[in-house]
Each structure stands twice: as structure tokens, then as C-alpha cells.
Image (spheres, grey):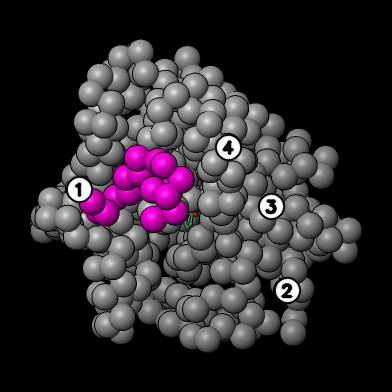
């Protein structure tokens, strides 16, 4: 395999994992981030995000001199012939994706490209962004340097990002030239991916938005089913199991609960809906998916209210704030919204999360942050389980019952065993389980 020189712009959850894994498979990578705090941390051997296994892999590849860090794109493009754009595409109030980071990175790439470069769009972007990047680079480049645009959407999941990157179920390459396709195939060759799907640029961009929107739809679908189950006294987890046994449906993403969050599903769903309307087709199914998702959080708070009658003055122990387990990411986490809603009704919140408390701190006002789950449940009128960290399943619930004022568990992720909880004397309520 020929080792390539790669520059990754944006060293966040996607960029840092991408850069590190490309170094791990033998390439020479420089990861750029213009956030001085992030750059300083990386330069000094500290990993600014929590992702299992990443710390070790970064250290290993820095020591091998295959991975380095920089703050400016000019440094990154000194040697690289492939540049990945992995900056954020956050949502704007109207639901559209904010592409200002992408645009400014495109201009900088144009300014500093030295020889033929493959520009890879790794960030999740609305369809036709690749074309805009291409126009921008063409307009701003100083010399007549050739380049090719590639869309290479990322499907990694936080918490299992390294495994997902190193063992992908598919790699999607949206390309416009055979030359770029060959370079990208060579780059990824050591991964021995099960399937490399080569498409045009726009189809690759739509694959990412459509995939995330579809998964979000699956979650909202089972959550709607779970509401019917609650009304008639059926068990949504059994219904989901029965549905999932059909290979046309599949079992994944059929878990009733408080809904999805994170940096991807909510914003990608909205951005896909926005772009569809802009293009002249209102994909309004996606608006309902969002509405159902938000409704689950409201419903969860209502369930606590129903159980406790009045929330004002009650103490709620919240276990879990990360949007899912094995990450410190709290962006658009359902837990933050639920905490807000509980507080707005006068409830006191005591919280514990094994990893995400530091990232959550700026969002938590008047919340008692606890060192462990047992401290969080002390004197609580309700335990609200909001992230399915495996350690929460292994807690000593007998001890928890003794520490609480009233033994009420509201399991927003259906991760505890209802029969066992009832046996211990809890008033246990899951989602979609009457
Ligand atoms: P992030 O916020 O963790 O990382 C983005 C990084 O880009 C930040 O560190 C920021 O400082 C840096 N940055 C911004 N402008 C820059 C510039 N001009 N030069 C250098 N660095 C710059 O975001 P993320 O979670 O890694 O997501 C990045 C993109 O990947 C988004 O489009 C997202 O939708 C997509 N994506 C994310 C995931 C995920 O699980 N997080 C998965 C697949 C795709």
C-alpha cells in the first residue's frame, strides 16, 4: 500500500477519529483545528472528546510520527494531496444547515493548494453543497492548480466510532472523476470494506441525509407505537421484538424511549426537510418525525407529573445526560430538554452521568451535580433514567430504594427489568410498557 499524505480540517468527533484511523492504517495525517483550546490540548497529548479507544490510538500514531496536529490549513496543505473537510454544520433557527464553516474552509483550501488535490466533503451537508465548494475553490484559487471534489459521508456512531471507521459496512464515494475515485479507493484499501459504493456527488450527499432521516423515522415510528401500547396495556418492547424479527424491518432502532438527540439526527432531519422544501418538494413526513420525537420528552415529563401529582418542590434524580451511552456528547440531548421542563415546573434536579457531566455543565443551571448515582437518588421522589449507560443496569437498586423518598422509577430508555424492579418494591414505569 502507498502511504498518502492527508490533511483533515476540523478535529472534532468526526475529524479526529477519521484522521487517527487513517494514520492507524498507514497514512500520514495532519489534523487541523482552529479552536486554540482544542489545538493546544491535542498538541499536548490531551484528547478533547471522550471516545472509547481514541486516546490510545492517537498516542500510538503520534509516536509513530504518522499523526500530527496543526492550527492552520496552510500547515496542513504543505504536503497533503487529499484534504478532508470535517467541520461542523450546525442547525440554524429555520432548520437549514449553517454552511459558513464549510465555505470559509473552502476558501482557505483554494488559497493554499499547491498541486493536484482531492477535496473530500466528510461533514454532513445538504445536497449540492459539493458543487458550491467546487465553485468556491475555483473562484478563489490563486494558481491554476487542478483539484477534484469527492463526497464521502461519514456513518460512524459516537461511542463505537473507531470500530465503525475501521470496519465499515459501506464506504460511499460520490465522485466526478476516475482519478479521484482511484485515489480514494487506494486510501481506504487497507480497510478491506465489505462494499464501496461509487455514486455521483449529489447522490452521495443525499445518501447521508436520507439514512439519518430514515433511522430517525424508525425511532419515531416505534415511539408512536409505544404510545398506543401504553393506552391499551400492551408492551412496546415485545411489539418491537415481533416486528424486528421480520428481516424486511430489522430489529435495530426499534427501541421505545424518550427519543433521539445528538449532533446528527435532529439537525440532519431538519436540514433534509429544509432543502427538500427549497428545492420544491415538501418532505413533510420529516416534520412529523420531529414532532413525535419532541412529544416523547413532553410525554415523559407528564408521566412523572401524573405519578407525583405536583412537581413543584419535588426532587428528581436524573441518571444520564449524554444523548446516548459511551459518549460525552450532550448536543441536543433529550435529557437537557427534560431537565428544563422539570425545572420550569418547580422540580429540583440532582444529576449523575459517568462521563458527560463536564460537557453538560454549561447547560445545567441550578442543578445539583453528584459524584455517583447513589448521591443523585438521595431524597429523590423519582429516579428518571435518561441515558442507557450499562453501569446503570448494574446499580444496587435495593440500596437506591432505601435512599429515595419515594420508590418511583421512570425509565426513559427501558433499560431495567420491570419485573425485578417491581419485586424490589418500586413503582416502575418504562416507555410503552403499561
Ligand atoms: P465537532 O463540532 O465535534 O467538530 C468540528 C470541528 O471543526 C471543531 O473542533 C471546530 O473547532 C473545527 N473547525 C471549525 N471551523 C474550522 C476551520 N475553519 N478550520 C479548522 N477547524 C475548524 O463536529 P463533529 O461532531 O465532528 O461533526 C462534524 C461534521 O460531521 C458535521 O457535519 C456532522 O454532521 C458530521 N457527522 C458527525 C457525526 C457524529 O457522530 N458526531 C457522524 C457523522 C457525521
- The residue mark sitting in front, 4 or 1, is 4
**Residue in the foreground of this view, choosing between 358 and 354:** 354
Sequence-first disc among 4 and 2: 2
Q: What element does badge 4 sit on? A: helix
Q: Is mark 1 within 8 Å of ligand 1?
A: no
Instruction: From this view, report whether residue 210 is shown above or below residue 266.
Output: below
Sequence-first disc among 4 and 1: 1
**Residue in the foreground of this view, choosing between 10 and 54:** 54
Q: Measuring 40% from the left and 41% from the top, which residue is drawn there?
A: 426
- Residue 69 location (% of width, % of height): 75, 48
Dot 3 crowding, Cα within 10 Å, few <14, some 14–19, many 20+: many
Dot 2 crowding, Cα within 10 Å, few <14, some 14–19, many 20+: some
Q: Is mark 4 within 8 Å of ligand 1?
A: no
**Residue in the foreground of this view, choosing between 75 and 205:** 205
Dot 1 crowding, Cα within 10 Å, few <14, some 14–19, many 20+: some
Q: Which residue is mark 1?
A: 292
- Residue 351 location (% of width, % of height): 52, 29
Residue 430, magenta (yes or no) = yes
Q: What element does badge 3 sit on? A: strand
Dot 4 crowding, Cα within 10 Å, few <14, some 14–19, many 20+: few
Q: What element does badge 2 sit on? A: loop
Q: Quadrant of residue 77?
A: bottom right
Sequence-first disc among 3 and 2: 2
Q: Which residue is mark 4?
A: 399
User: Would you say 382 lies left or right of 4 here?
Assistant: left
Q: What element does badge 1 sit on? A: helix
Q: Measuring 52% from the left and 86% from the top, which residue is drawn there?
A: 194
What label sits on residue 31 in the rendered view? 3
Amino acid at each position: 500500500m502507498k502511504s498518502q499524505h492527508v490533511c483533515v480540517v476540523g478535529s472534532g468527533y468526526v475529524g479526529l477519529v477519521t484522521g487517527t484511523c487513517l494514520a492507524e492504517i498507514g497514512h500520514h495525517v495532519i489534523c487541523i483545528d482552529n479552536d486554540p483550546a482544542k489545538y493546544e490540548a491535542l498538541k499536548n497529548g490531551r484528547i478533547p472528546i471522550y471516545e472509547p479507544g481514541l486516546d490510545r490510538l492517537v498516542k500510538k500514531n503520534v509516536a509513530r510520527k504518522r499523526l500530527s496536529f496543526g492550527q492552520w490549513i496552510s500547515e496542513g496543505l504543505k504536503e497533503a494531496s487529499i484534504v478532508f473537510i470535517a467541520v461542523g454544520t450546525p442547525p440554524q433557527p429555520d432548520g437549514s444547515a449553517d454552511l459558513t464553516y464549510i465555505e470559509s474552509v473552502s476558501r482557505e483550501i483554494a488559497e493554499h493548494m499547491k498541486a493536484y488535490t482531492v477535496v473530500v466533503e466528510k461533514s454532513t451537508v445538504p445536497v449540492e453543497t459539493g458543487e458550491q465548494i467546487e465553485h468556491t475553490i475555483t473562484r478563489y484559487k490563486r494558481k491554476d492548480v487542478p483539484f477534484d471534489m469527492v463526497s464521502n459521508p461519514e456513518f460512524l456512531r459516537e461511542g463505537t466510532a473507531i470500530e465503525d471507521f475501521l470496519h465499515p459496512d459501506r464506504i460511499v464515494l460520490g465522485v466526478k472523476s476516475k482519478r479521484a475515485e482511484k485515489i480514494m479507493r487506494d486510501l481506504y484499501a487497507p480497510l478491506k470494506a465489505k462494499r464501496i459504493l461509487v455514486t455521483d456527488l449529489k447522490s452521495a450527499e443525499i445518501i447521508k441525509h436520507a439514512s439519518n432521516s430514515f433511522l430517525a423515522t424508525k425511532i419515531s415510528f416505534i415511539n408512536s407505537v409505544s404510545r398506543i401500547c401504553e393506552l391499551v396495556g400492551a408492551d412496546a418492547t415485545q411489539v418491537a421484538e415481533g416486528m424486528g424479527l421480520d428481516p424486511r424491518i430489522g430489529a435495530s432502532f426499534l427501541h421505545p424511549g424518550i427519543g433521539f438527540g445528538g449532533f446528527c439526527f435532529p439537525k440532519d432531519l431538519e436540514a433534509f426537510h429544509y432543502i427538500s422544501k427549497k428545492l420544491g418538494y415538501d418532505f413533510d413526513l420529516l416534520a412529523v418525525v420531529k414532532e413525535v420525537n419532541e412529544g416523547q420528552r413532553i410525554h415523559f415529563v407528564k408521566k412523572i407529573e401524573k405519578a407525583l401529582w405536583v412537581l413543584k418542590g419535588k426532587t428528581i434524580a436524573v441518571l444520564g445526560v449524554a444523548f446516548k451511552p459511551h459518549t460525552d456528547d450532550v448536543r441536543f440531548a433529550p435529557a437537557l430538554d427534560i431537565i428544563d421542563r422539570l425545572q420550569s415546573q418547580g422540580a429540583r434536579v440532582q444529576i449523575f452521568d459517568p462521563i458527560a457531566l463536564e460537557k453538560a455543565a454549561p447547560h445545567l443551571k441550578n442543578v445539583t451535580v453528584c459524584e455517583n448515582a447513589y448521591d443523585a437518588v438521595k431524597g429523590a421522589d423519582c429516579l428518571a433514567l435518561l441515558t442507557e449507560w450499562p453501569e446503570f443496569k448494574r446499580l444496587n437498586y435495593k440500596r437506591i430504594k432505601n435512599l429515595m423518598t419515594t420508590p418511583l422509577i421512570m425509565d426513559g430508555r427501558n433499560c431495567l427489568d420491570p419485573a425485578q424492579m417491581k419485586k424490589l418494591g418500586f413503582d416502575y414505569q418504562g416507555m410503552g410498557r403499561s
